[in-house]
Amino acid sequence: MVIAYHLIFTAYGWWLPNDPRGSRSREIRSDIIAELGELHHGRKRIQPPGPEIRAFYEQARRLLKHELRTFDESTRAIIACGFAQVIRDRQYTCYACAIMPDHVHILIRKHRDKAEHMIANLQETSRAHLIEQNVYPSDHPVWGGSVPAAGWKVFLNTADDIERTIRHIERNLIPYGLPAQSHDFVTVYDGWDLSRAAR
């Protein structure tokens, strides 16, 4: 029984289908992107060194239609405001969120909205905030992949799954040298479990 979703989505141009680290994509839809190399489905057991990854994205930067950007501190704050609006308006319960320089991890309790709709709502509203604040031009994609709801979802079935995922999301900040993030839309997990709540 699914009780929560770990949602992951990337900034435009990052984690491409032929990323040398591997990806969840099963096809390359752009001939231009295909020039970067073969599809690597699935995360590689042995990860390539940092210089190889950086070289791949330097090449991608020259081929992509739009500028390849990362989210700095001020941009992450605007994205967080967009997420807060969605979580408030849609009455989601969010247990963890890490807004990284090139992707997002967020954990949301089961809701009447499907996971795909949650991703779409978060992406659309945060993009609108960035455009309103003149951080992105209106013709520049903020999020990667096809629209709407380009991202991945991991189904969580137990309280242990939720607690483990919260720790995983928090640890994601460490390799980037980012401090712990505190978002007012994040609710401290209290052990809620749908199977127990239904009794």
Image (spheres, rainbow, N blue to C red):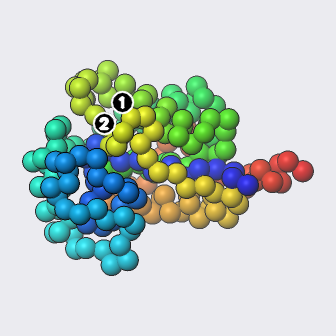
**Is 147 displayed left or right of 193 in the figure?**
left
Q: Indicate the quadrant containing the N terminus: top left, top right, bottom left or bottom right.
A: bottom right
Q: Is residue 65 above or below residue 153?
A: above
Q: Secondary structure at mark 1?
A: helix
- Quadrant for residue 149, please give it: top left
Where is residue 78? Give x, y as percent.
Answer: 36, 33
Of the numbered discs in the image, which one, if any, rests on residue 142? 2
Amino acid type of the residue that numbered disc 2 sits on in the rendered structure:
Val
Of callouts 2 and 1, which one flags the residue occurring earlier in the amino acid sequence?
1
For the residues marked 2 and 1, what is the alpha-carbon distance in whole angstroms? 6 Å
Where is residue 154? Give x, y as percent.
Answer: 55, 55
**Is 9 displayed left or right of 30 in the figure?**
right
Q: Residues within 10 Å of mark 2 (few under 14, many from 20)?
A: many
Amino acid type of the residue that numbered disc 1 sits on in the rendered structure:
Arg
Question: Does residue 96 show up?
Answer: no
Observer-nearest of 18 and 73? 18
Where is residue 134? Give x, y as percent.
Answer: 25, 24
Q: Is residue 31 above or below residue 164?
A: above
Of the numbered discs in the image, which one, if any, rests on residue 36? none
Where is residue 99? Give x, y as percent.
Answer: 40, 47
Q: Is residue 77 above or below residue 163?
A: above
Asked if disc 2 and disc 1 are in contact, CB closer than 8 Å, the reply is yes
Q: Secondary structure at mark 2?
A: loop
Residue receiving disc 1 = 127
Residue at image location 41% in from the left, 42% down from the top = 150
Q: Is residue 128 above or below residue 92?
A: above
Q: Residues within 10 Å of mark 1 (few under 14, many from 20)?
A: many
